[in-house]
Amino acid sequence: MKQVLRITTLLASFSLTFAGVTSAQAQDSGMYISFKGAKAFSLRSTFDPTGGVPTDSYDLDFKNEWAASSSIGQRLNEYLRIEAELGYLVNTVDKMSSDTVTISGSGGGNVHSSYIIASVLADLPLTDQITAFVGGGIGAAKPGMDKQILSGVNQTREMEIEDQYVFAWKLTGGLSYEMYENTHLFADYTYFQTADFDVKQKSTVSGIPFQNTLETNLSTHMIGLGLRYDF
């Protein structure tokens, strides 16, 4: 909950700082801000070993996945715009399984990621009020995970993600509807993925401690709904 509050505060500060630009500076500048919430459908994350015990491998399935983001953008012309998006994705661990390790219990918790993406978007006006858009972008993500404590016969295993930043990218497309002057309601689909990142594992098997390094990534489909205001 503290992480959710922190990222919500960060998103609000990010947008309010931009919104603090004076109306004289922003008038007809082509700039805009947007806020979006999304239902996420994250794909199974596979934790593969890269060091230590080569037989350890795990799969994580998720539930209750969602994302929130805020963006600032600049329109280049009638058809092209660029934007920077700051977002947060969270997935609740539904089940952890393994084909190589017997697991009788799991600590649950969340796998999450904050991210910042710079995107190029193309607009195609369909009517006076409805516009289709498509685009993509690249950036960085900071993944995190509540510590996973696994138990089995004569063994315990702990896994957590250390502080690290990794490459991230997205593809997106959707429709926007101008409800009022300069105010747009939009719906979009986004595919988001991070590069591989390391997960540290500490285990005790039959009283013998050892450490291992696993590798995984986050990939998800998002269906979003948001508001955009053009200055």
Image: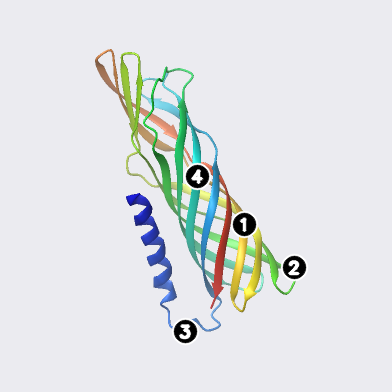
Element type at mark 1: strand
Total numbered circles: 4
Cα–Cα gap, marks 2 and 4: 32 Å
Q: Amino acid at mark 2?
A: Leu
The circle drawn on residue 23 is 3
Q: Amino acid at mark 4?
A: Glu
Q: Mark 4 = which residue?
A: 65
Mark 1: give few (<14), some (14-19) or many (20+) Cα within 10 Å.
some
What x and y, as percent, mark residue 29?
Answer: 53, 80
Element type at mark 4: strand
Q: Dots 1 and 3: beta carbons under 8 Å?
A: no
What x and y, as percent, mark residue 37?
Answer: 52, 57
Position of 9 relative to 156 (above/below)? below
The circle drawn on residue 126 is 2
Position of 14 relative to 208 (above/below)? below
Element type at mark 3: helix
Cα–Cα gap, marks 1 and 3: 29 Å
The circle drawn on residue 188 is 1
